[in-house]
Image: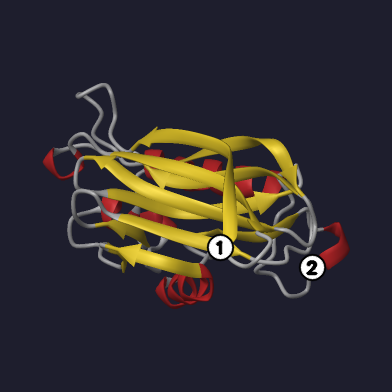
Amino acid sequence: YELARESVTAEFANAIDTAHQSFIDRNCTSFDKQSDENMNPCIEAWISSPGGYGPGEINAFINSHKTDVKDWITENQMGEGWSNKVGFIATKADASFTLRFNDIAKDIRVVTIYFIRSYGEKWKDSRAKFTISRVQEKEGGGTSAFVVSEDVISGIHDDVTHTHSPTLDQSMVLSETILKGESIEMKVDLVSGSHFKIMGMMLCEK
């Protein structure tokens, strides 16, 4: 996990810098307890990379918000190279998990996912569907969920000649703003392949 910059290729170092820069550009630093909460546009924000979240923090985040987890784990291996850096990974076909964020502290309009796009047999057909929903209490008890965004992200390069595993980001603009005090749910389903790795996520006003 604590991989020195000099031990990584320039291409991989650039991938780290790009992912971190996009994270910084959004001014979303909820993991920094010294940041001004009123200036932070996000209710949640983390990214796994040198200087970012480690396995313990990822597990704590998932455990705090999960309602269901099937065949996803926090992976912390470097044995097979850069594609095995710390992240939350699907380990079997049809893996899924659901997170819920209740009584949110800010309006949410954009959800951003940081993920690995890799190569090779392990990542063959890797695709995950992300579904974001507004969750509301129903009269008489229970809840209802209304989908406000859905996207499928590929975890493998289209070009078979690619032999690197950058951390990329993809933003989902919600069809409706989830308002402060409401609840938001994220469901992730592995729709093809047997692996997909999430490197971070942000839930933000903009």
SS class of the residue under badge 2? loop
Compared across the picture, whether 72 is left or right of 139 comes to left
Judge whether 140 appears above or below 116 on screen: below
**If the image is split into quadrants, where does the C terminus sit?**
top right
Residue 66: x and y, percent? 47, 68
Residue 135's image quarter?
bottom right
Residue 67: x and y, percent? 46, 68
CA separation in Å, label 1 and label 2? 24 Å
Compared across the picture, whether 183 is left or right of 126 comes to right
**Does residue 140 show up?**
yes
Amino acid on which the number 2 mark rests in the picture: Ser
Instruction: Please state which of residues 101 and 61 is positioned toward the viewer in this rendering.
Output: 101
Number of residues whose C-alpha sits closer than 10 Å to that of mark 1, classed few (under 14), some (14–19) or many (20 or more): many
Number of residues whose C-alpha sits closer than 10 Å to that of mark 2, classed few (under 14), some (14–19) or many (20 or more): few
Amino acid on which the number 1 mark rests in the picture: Arg
- Of tags 1 and 2, the one toward the viewer is 1
* Residue at x 57% of width, y 50% of height: 145
Residue 81: x and y, percent? 23, 53
Compared across the picture, whether 106 is left or right of 174 comes to right
Residue situated furthest right in the rendering: 38
Residue 100, which numbered label? 1
Compared across the picture, whether 145 is left or right of 110 comes to left
Which callout, 1 or 2, points at the residue further toward the start of the chain? Answer: 2
Residue 30: x and y, percent? 69, 65
Instruction: Please state which of residues 92 and 103 is positioned toward the viewer in this rendering.
Output: 103
Residue where numbered disc 2 is placed: 35
Colour style of the rendered protein structure: secondary structure
* Residue at x 23% of width, y 49% of height: 94
* Residue at x 51% of width, y 53% of height: 186
Residue situated furthest front in the rendering: 140
* Residue at x 29% of width, y 38% of height: 164
SS class of the residue under badge 1? strand
